[in-house]
Image (spheres, helix red, strand yellow):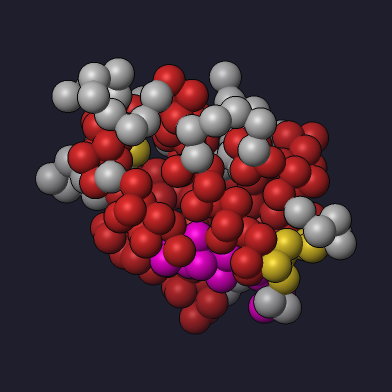
Amino acid sequence: MSYEEDSEFGDFWNRKIRNFHNRFDANRDGKLSEEDFNLIAVRLNGSAGLQGREADATKRYFTEDIWKVYFNTSGGGPASADDFAENLINVGKKQIVATCFNIFNRYFRAIDTNRSGLVSLKEFTRFYYIIGMSEELAKESFAAIDTNADGVLSRGEFIQAGAEYFTEEYEGNPSDLFFGPVP
């Protein structure tokens, strides 16, 4: 079944999923793999100056908790954008919502490098630069999902925007910019 056929997901949703896939394809080989999530963790550790247990925890978040639990959808191998979208369609919106709470909670913990319980623009920009977004795009995304405009992202704002990115179909939601403009 493709996303056009008898699906609750349409073209705009598919473009968002492809945008996410492209952002997290850290080695730029056209597929999501454990290697991509490892590269992201290594880059985040280096840019945030994390070492020792903190660096190990971040790597585990990305390679074991995030990749292996949520994205390892092709029987252990790399997933093309089509494979990734198809797997999400098969999972369905209700399961995606439940999964998003867990995954974006983990992303939040990895991005909140100073452990303040809030993600600053600096922390957000650092992470989004690592996944290939320019500082300008990161600032635009941050401003869109900072719904109360207080200059920081609470865990709730971050998780809600991430979940909406993966579940909302209509254009015009601030969460549409969570991973940069949708092509």
Which of the 4 image quadrants contains residue 79? Answer: top left
Q: Residue at x 42, y 66 (%)?
A: 102
Q: Is residue 47 left or right of residue 135?
A: left
Look at the picture and state if 102 lies above or below 180.
below
User: Could you say where residue 154 lies in the image, as x and y percent from the top left?
Assistant: 70, 67
Which of the 4 image quadrants contains residue 50? Answer: bottom right
Q: Is residue 5 left or right of residue 16?
A: left
Q: Is residue 28 visible?
A: no
For this orientation, the residue located farthest to the left is: 75
Q: Residue at x 46, y 43 (%)?
A: 166
Q: Residue at x 34, y 65 (%)?
A: 65
Q: Residue at x 23, y 24 (%)?
A: 6
User: Could you say where residue 159 lies in the image, as x and y percent from the top left?
Assistant: 56, 60
For this orientation, the residue located farthest to the right is: 150
User: Could you say where residue 116 lies in the image, as x and y percent from the top left?
Assistant: 72, 78
Look at the picture and state if 67 lies above or below 19.
below
The region drawn magenta spans 102-115
Which of the 4 image quadrants contains residue 148? Answer: bottom right
Q: Quadrant of the N terminus?
A: top left
Q: Quadrant of the C terminus?
A: top right
User: Could you say where residue 31 lies in the image, as x and y percent from the top left?
Assistant: 32, 31
Q: Is residue 127 visible?
A: yes
